Amino acid sequence: MPGITVIIPTWNRADLLRSVLENLRQQTMSPAQTLVVDNGSVDGTAGVAARLGSERIALDRNLGFAAAVNAGISAAKHEWILILNNDVELQPDWLECALEAANQGGVQFVAGKILQAHAPERLDGTWDLVTRSGCAWRCGWNALDGPAWSVRRPIEIAPMTATMFHRAVFERAGLVDVRYESYYEDVDFGLRCALAGLTGVYEPRCVARHMGSATLNSDGRMTYFVSRNQVLLAAKFQLSQLSRRAVWLGQAFALLPPIRTGHLLSALKGKRDGIRMAKRLAVERVDRARLQALLVRNEEELRGFQEKLGFDLSWKLYFGLAGK
């Protein structure tokens, strides 16, 4: 049976690390290798990793989620690689279920159903859909769980909250882009996978619970990175060449959620810094027709879900004004 390496990026959350490592010990199939990538923690992270039998890769400072993932990939020894947030709890058969799904479908990556830890009747994540604006939606976020989310299906973009990849994916699509630091690095990676013809599967029998932004949620830092990296994604893939109108409208309407959460200033700083970084950003060389077809397909699916669930204001405005 092929082995699984689990990569857990972490920073100054020894409490969460203890929980996720103890959770892995309860799996019906044990991981062959567990790598804790420590982003320069100054708490008890090193001791927790040692006591619970994981390998620790120590970075000298916090380089962000993307750099930590890459360090783990470079040290991974096994065929399958599970990238796992430190604030996720997997149901006991998650690894076994994911490997079974991968073997049945002949796919390159497997994502499961992720529920909100504090409201497990609601979804935290499934798979991602990205638009011509560079803004993405975690499909079904905050919707009530139910039959619609319990069907196995092919997917193109998977969140790195808890997704298992075949190591060949990184050989073909490359590593995670460290310029994002944290947030949207998985959307970027998913786009590159889709454009390379790599396919995944959403397996709803693989259930996890996610606390959500437990490391960067206290002072608007999450909002800053999301806002900045939406700009970086649009610039890197030159989305304004597909539709300048869609980019400007989508980026503007993405400021509405931060207004509701009181983090508008952080979001505006993110957009400002994203524009500055975009001026010296190397662009991704891709098949433009294939990229456009992918994004249009994603938008059509996103619009369909929004119609069924009830439009968020930002998406309602975007679809009403961006055009096709």
Image (cartoon, rainbow, N blue to C red):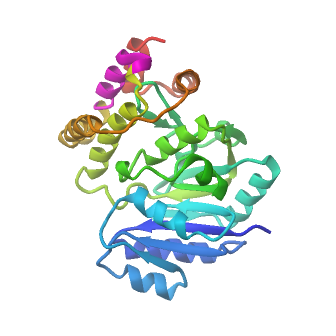
Q: How many labels does the image show?
A: 0
Q: Does the magenta stretch include residue 247?
A: yes
Pinpoint residue 58: horizontal percent, then vertical percent: 39, 76
Figure quadrant of residue 152: top right
Report the front residue among 86 and 295.
295
State whether residue 225 is above or below residue 308.
Answer: below
Q: What stretch is highlighted in magenta?
A: 241-255
State whether residue 98 is above or below residue 8.
Answer: above
Q: Residue at x 37, y 60 (%)?
A: 214
Q: Which residue is drawn at 17% across and 40% down?
A: 265
Pinpoint residue 313: horizontal percent, then vertical percent: 37, 24
State whether residue 162 is above or below residue 24.
Answer: above
Compared across the picture, whether 29 is left or right of 125 comes to: right
**Quadrant (top left, top right, bottom left, bottom right) of the N terminus:** bottom right
Q: Is residue 144 visible?
A: no
Pinpoint residue 209: horizontal percent, then vertical percent: 54, 58
Identify the main secondary structure in magenta: helix
Report the front residue among 235 and 28.
235
Q: Is residue 1 visible?
A: yes
Report the front residue among 318 and 42.
42
Compared across the picture, whether 306 is left or right of 106 comes to: left
Compared across the picture, whether 310 is left or right of 251 comes to: right
State whether residue 76 is above or below residue 175.
Answer: below
Compared across the picture, whether 36 is left or right of 58 comes to: right
Report the front residue among 114 and 300.
300
Figure quadrant of residue 273: top left
Pinpoint residue 26: horizontal percent, then vertical percent: 64, 75
